[in-house]
Amino acid sequence: MTAGIEEVKVLESGLKLFLRGGKCLQFEDCWLRDHCRCTSCYHESTFQRAQHILDIPESKIVSASSKESNLYVKWEDGHQSVYDIKFLSQFDYDEWNERRTLKPVLWNGPEVVQKLTKIPVEKFLGSVDGARIVFQNLLDYGVALIDGVEPTTSATQVVCEALGGIQHTLFGGMWEFTTRADHADTAYTNIPLAVHNDNTYFTEAAGLQILHCLEHSNGIGGETILVDGFYGALKMKEASPEDYDFLTKFHVEAEYIEEGHHQKYCAPVIRVNSDTNKLEQIRFNVYDRAPMAFADSKQCRSYYRSLRNLARYYQDPANQWKFKLIPGTVMAMDNFRVLHGRTGFSGHRVLSGCYVSRSDWLDKARTLRLIE
């Protein structure tokens, strides 16, 4: 932003800036002092403050003036600050909040396949443009497909590292799974899996789940099923606002038990941002629900009614995208948003993949300047 300052007005508790073009910004004195960018207040090389919050003086503004693109502030304790208007202009609250809010593109059923751009692995790994397309697909639709990957765990690992890095859990880092019961999880069978989010029993569920079918021989079935969890939640909100509200507030407990491990976590099935009321996470898993006690009969019945109502949207074939994962195609999905499942299968089927933490894949998206 290149707008200059037309007028500076010092207030009792801060100041107001009138910018060319009609925009007005107001800042509290405590905020301005906290964001002073002089060398004694800020380490420019590390992008970190130089003072503890208890050491920042609670000082009043004596005077303020502007010249070209800078704001100059003098404080009653003698300190002087200089601010670039480009920096200050970032903190208009409405615009700041809007920039920080992710904007998922809702989808239902196989229509999403027309929107996704399948990227060759060489383009994803070898170019910024390829990486931007993959991460934009994840931000928009919660799914990305990368093609031409050698059907080996080592080749899959290279893709996983580029998607943000491998998150180690009780299941390991990179994993291969078949019908061999390596863990106490229904995924290690050949029976159908209803759509669900993984890791509802973790304090923070994995951000991405990455899957690559390395082999499926001498059998049929095993189609992947994906559902946009945000779409289903918002459709339920339209039809059953009381149930939606219940699932945004009531803490559902989930757990995972196997020898040497007992994971447990309790949180709402639908998480919304308290400032924007936008959806942030779905933690829906019919398999991982722990036994719970309820405060009264109303709460108990609300629990079952609301979960069943939400499940109907997720189990509706019209809302599901069903397709066959084949060797060579790596699928990454946003585990905070997209539910996944599979049809039953026969034969020898081997999948490879891993989890990526949400912090790590969003870190990649920010470095690509796709989000703030």
Image (tube, rainbow, N blue to C red):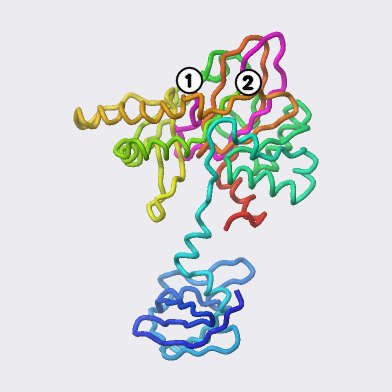
**Quadrant housing the C terminus:** bottom right
* Residue shown at the point (40%, 39%) measured from the top left: 270
Query: Bounds of the magenta span?
Result: 194-222
**Quadrant housing the N terminus:** bottom right
User: In the displayed structure, does residue 172 sit left or right of residue 61?
Assistant: right
Q: Place residue 45 in its image quadrant.
A: bottom right
Q: Position of residue 279 (x, y in %)?
A: 44, 45
User: In the displayed structure, does residue 296 sit left or right of residue 142?
Assistant: left
* Residue shown at the point (56%, 47%) measured from the top left: 359
Name the residue tied to disc 1: 259
* Residue shown at the point (59%, 71%) measured from the top left: 43
Which one is nearer the viewer's eye here, 218 or 265?
Answer: 218
Q: Position of residue 186 (x, y in %)?
A: 51, 18
Is 239 above or below relative to 289? below
Tell me the CA gap for discs 1 and 2.
Answer: 18 Å
Residue 286: image tag? none
Amino acid type, label 2: Phe
Which one is nearer the viewer's eye here, 103 or 288?
Answer: 103
Q: Residues within 10 Å of mark 1 (few under 14, many from 20)?
A: few
Is 95 above or below relative to 32? above
Name the residue tied to disc 2: 177
Mark 1 or mark 2: which is in front? 2
Q: Is residue 37 magenta?
A: no
Is 88 above or below relative to 271? below
Secondary element at tag 2? strand
Q: How many numbered discs, if any? A: 2
Secondary element at tag 1? loop
Amino acid type, label 1: Glu
Q: Place residue 3 in its image quadrant.
A: bottom right
